[in-house]
Image: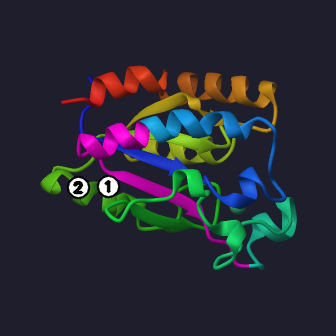
Amino acid sequence: MIKNPAVILIDVQNDFFTGPLKTKRVPAIIQPLQRLLVASHKNSVPVIYSIDAHYPQDVEVTRKWGTHAIKGTVGAEVIPELAPDKADYVVEKRTYSGFYETGLDPLLRSLYGGDGVKTVVLGGVHTNMCIRHTSADAFFRGYYIVIVEDGVEAFTEKDHKEGLKYLEYVYNAKVMATNEIIQEIVK
Ligand code: ZN
């Protein structure tokens, strides 16, 4: 049973799928996430896009990954296949964590008539980086964590598998297939 879920899609943006940080591995997550979005919308599960909107001077850009997902550019737009609906929420971030100095936490607490989201269902990229750091901050704030097993990816198989193990071990995340999650959120 997944209580008061919100689906959070992380960094599902052009620069991670077709731009400078693309990998051959990521297209595989599109179709499962599309199915999850359809089911979420149908069952009134809130959908939140937690996406990079970098300034060129951000540490991630200057010290680590180079130019990617710069606020206002095409590279920072959500990929067309997973484009947000009108009712979805978009919360911009400037680091690996969707919570770090963003409005994500107050948004989650305001949903379900003020009862708040209890479980974050995380999809997107990358398993061992933004998914991991967002999971950490979700755990610290008391949220339950579900990871969409076929809806997250990383640069390598090793990164991905180790990433999933870490999430399960450290944050007690539940790794579930898209179909399993859909069954649970259908009312
Ligand atoms: Zn970034």
The answer to whether residue 99 shows anywhere in this view is no
Asked if residue 100 is positioned above or below residue 47 in the image, the reply reads: below
Q: From the viewer's side, name the closer residue of 16 and 131.
A: 16
Helix or strand or loop: what does disc 2 sit on? loop
Q: Which residue is mark 1?
A: 108
Residue 89, horizontal then vertical, whole percent: 38, 62
- Which residue sits at x=40%, y=20%? 180
Q: How has the structure been colored for display?
A: rainbow
Question: How many neighbours does mark 1 have within 10 angstroms: few (below 14), some (14-19), or many (20 or more)?
Answer: many
Where ligand 1 lies, by image quadrant?
A: bottom right
* In contact (CB < 8 Å): disc 2 and disc 1: yes
Q: Where does the C terminus fall, quadrant-wise?
A: top left
Please identify the quarter of the rendering in which residue 157 is found: top right
Q: Which residue is mark 2?
A: 111
Residue 103, horizontal then vertical, whole percent: 41, 67
The amino acid at mark 2 is Leu
Bounds of the magenta segment = 36-55
The amino acid at mark 1 is Leu
Helix or strand or loop: what does disc 1 sit on? helix
Instruction: Respond yes or no on whether mark 2 lies under 8 Å from ligand 1.
Output: no
